[in-house]
Image (cartoon, rainbow, N blue to C red):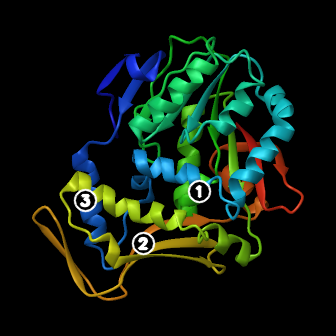
Amino acid sequence: MSHPRSSQAAQSSYGYIVSFHDLRPTPAAFRQEVIAGLRRARKAIPSKFFYDQRGSALFDKICQLEEYYLTRIETDLLERHAAEIAALIGDEALLIEYGSGSGRKTRVLLDQLPTLAAYVPVDISKEHLLAVAAELSQEYPCLRVTPVCADYTQEMAFPDFEEFPYRRRVVFFPGSSIGNFAPDEAEIFLRRAAEVARENGALLIGVDLRKDPTVIDAAYNDRQGVTAAFNLNLLRRINAELDADFDLRLFDHRAFYDPTHGRVEMHLVSSQSQTVRIGDEAFSFAAGEAIHTEDSYKYDLEDFQAMATRAGWKTKAAWQDERRYFAICLFTVT
């Protein structure tokens, strides 16, 4: 479990933010997870480590790509149903967003929720988190913004926010990021989200739905190569932060949809036999051997709602686009 190392008002280059809570994993934890993953028979690195400052910026570019339908459809759904969503959320809510992103979808909600008690963005990338939080605090000067830098995929000692009188907690988890968890892990995550939301709390979440595999495949293999750069940036980050010597020219991006398991798998594939060092550790790669970097599960809406029910949520409302590519669900704590 992560514990706070600091909590203070943040000003200077980021503008004014009410408070900042730093629950980041330590560099030692990053190193430990990377090395443990590379020691596995099937090498893997958790996708949460994509999101350093450069990785977050690259993901923002992915969200603007023609092939990446997810952001476009989800944003359109939010814009079309924002007033209805706001009415269901109600006044004086504490809005907790997991994965702050570019803030575009957040702004759609903020425009419809003028009485928010506070906005709490949670992200693992401190620089990206504070930059987005500062932008929003300047655009919405009456809004209390209190960012939390943390790995929200793990259990953590979440702040109480007793300084903000609020009527209910609402967890906002857009972008279909729930798909990065295997189904059993997703259910655990949803159960933890219910604990964060507490009694009378709510969850507003984006879910990517099963569809034509060619549409899904194109979203993760864009023509401009932005997704490939995003995937390879993970190795660049490991080089920079963990004293590693990955040669990015010797690894290729590979992503494919597995219809049997309903998931996209992303890998970095070694183009030749090689040895990579991380500090004093050495890791051998055969030609064609892969590092598994991400899964993205796609759901049938009814299956996802059933999983949420098992995790302690009750379906309040759900919205889908005309082609049923994507859904936004609102759940309440049972």
For marks 1 and 3, the one nearer the N-term is 1
Camera-side residue: 2 or 10?
Answer: 10
Quadrant of the drawing holding the N terminus: top left
The reply, left or right, for residue 175 in relation to residue 74 is left
* Image quadrant where residue 118 sits: top right
Residue bearing the label numbered 3: 239
Q: Percent position (x, y) of residue 45?
A: 37, 64
Residue bearing the label numbered 1: 62
Secondary structure of the residue carrying numbered label 2? strand
Quadrant of the drawing holding the C terminus: top right
Q: Residue 233: in sight, yes or no?
A: yes
Q: Residue furthest left?
A: 280
Q: Give how far apart the Cα atoms at labels 3 and 2 are.
A: 18 Å
75 shown above or below 114: below
Q: Which mark is residue 23?
A: none
Q: Give how far apart the Cα atoms at labels 1 and 3 are.
A: 23 Å
Q: Percent position (x, y) of residue 12?
A: 38, 17
The reply, left or right, for residue 60 in relation to residue 71 is left
Residue bearing the label numbered 2: 292
140 shown above or below 121: above
* Image quadrant where residue 300 sits: bottom right
The structure residue drawn at horizontal position 18% and vertical position 57%, both measured from the top left corner, is 243
Secondary structure of the residue carrying numbered label 1? helix
- Kind of residue sitting beneath label 1: Ile
Camera-side residue: 283 or 194?
Answer: 283
The structure residue drawn at horizontal position 50% and vertical position 53%, both measured from the top left corner, is 58
The reply, left or right, for residue 322 in relation to residue 103 is right
The structure residue drawn at horizontal position 47% and vertical position 18%, both measured from the top left corner, is 15
Camera-side residue: 210 or 308?
Answer: 210
- Kind of residue sitting beneath label 2: His
